[in-house]
Image (spheres, grey):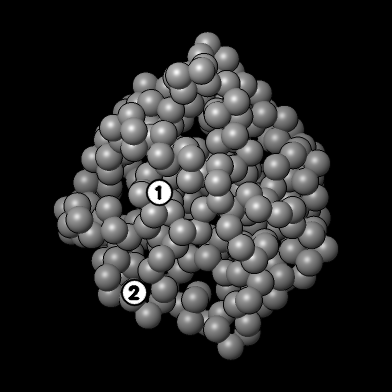
Amino acid sequence: MSTRIDARFAALKAEGRPGLVTFITAGDPDGTTSLALLNALPAAGADVIELGVPFTDPMADGPAIQAAGLRALKAGQTLAKTLAMVKLFRGEDNETPIVLMGYYNPIYVYGVDRFLEDAKAAGVDGLIIVDLPPEEDKELCLPALAAGIDFIRLATPTTDDARLPTVLKHTAGFVYYVSITGITGAATPDADLVRGAVARIKGHTPLPVAVGFGVKTPEQAAAIAAGADAVVVGSALVEVVRHTLDEKGHATANTVPAVTALVERLAEAVRAVRRQAAE
């Protein structure tokens, strides 16, 4: 069963370039602004969009995304509202893949079967659930795949060749390589080490490999994209949101333009990286 994610990576391969995956937190700093951001990302150059589902205990996230999640929760964001955002987005864009990224607890509370039915109806293409290891595939991964929603796994610098087949067994869409050990946005990845890690992962799977955690600037994005199928930028965009808020934490007229301006610069840098025709 082909998904929008499969189609987008096939198109990127045909174009001979890596992709740009952008992350924003649903509902940050409020529902209206967040939807406006979501709608603006494809035109700014996002090839795939990760939409963070706010959670009270985001253990894999650094301070920037933690703060974004708290802003969103304070503004009343829920999983149901996040799915509604995706459905509204789909009214304008039926091609750009949307991946929900977050933690299992909100989905468990919502109800797995109900969630998958509603997510599919809304137009969600993939899930990244960071606290569900492969040993728990029956909880959500296998039902998601059966529903036609890709389940995207994280591989890290500590995922060795013995562990990789287990991680990759039910992975679909793409593999998300975490380029650093630690939390999101905490350090800068080494492009040479990333290139070697991506090559190692590709020895185990035909899936595209997207690299994230710690990529902040267009220059870093281009360097990482040169050795991967896509680069993921999240904390840097979330920080732009924070810096544009007024003293009460509310969005300003500059919030959406500032984020899209950075996405445009990132996209320009990533799109300048060309793939060898033989790849």
The kind of secondary structure element at disc 1 is strand
Give coordinates of residue 258: x percent, y percent.
Answer: 62, 21
* Residue under the point 28% across and 75% down: 138
Q: Is residue 220 above or below residue 247?
A: below
**Visible in this render: residue 26?**
no
On the image, numbered disc 1 is attached to which residue?
A: 100
Camera-nearest residue between 63 and 256: 63
Camera-nearest residue between 6 and 223: 223
* Residue under the point 36% across and 49% down: 55
Q: Which mark is residue 137?
A: 2
State left or right for residue 67 relative to residue 263.
left
Amino acid on which disc 1 is placed: Leu
Image quadrant where residue 81 sits: top left
Within-10-Å neighbours for mark 1: few <14, some 14–19, many 20+ = many
Measure how far apart labels 1 and 2 are at the Cα level: 17 Å
Q: Is residue 167 above or below residue 234?
A: below
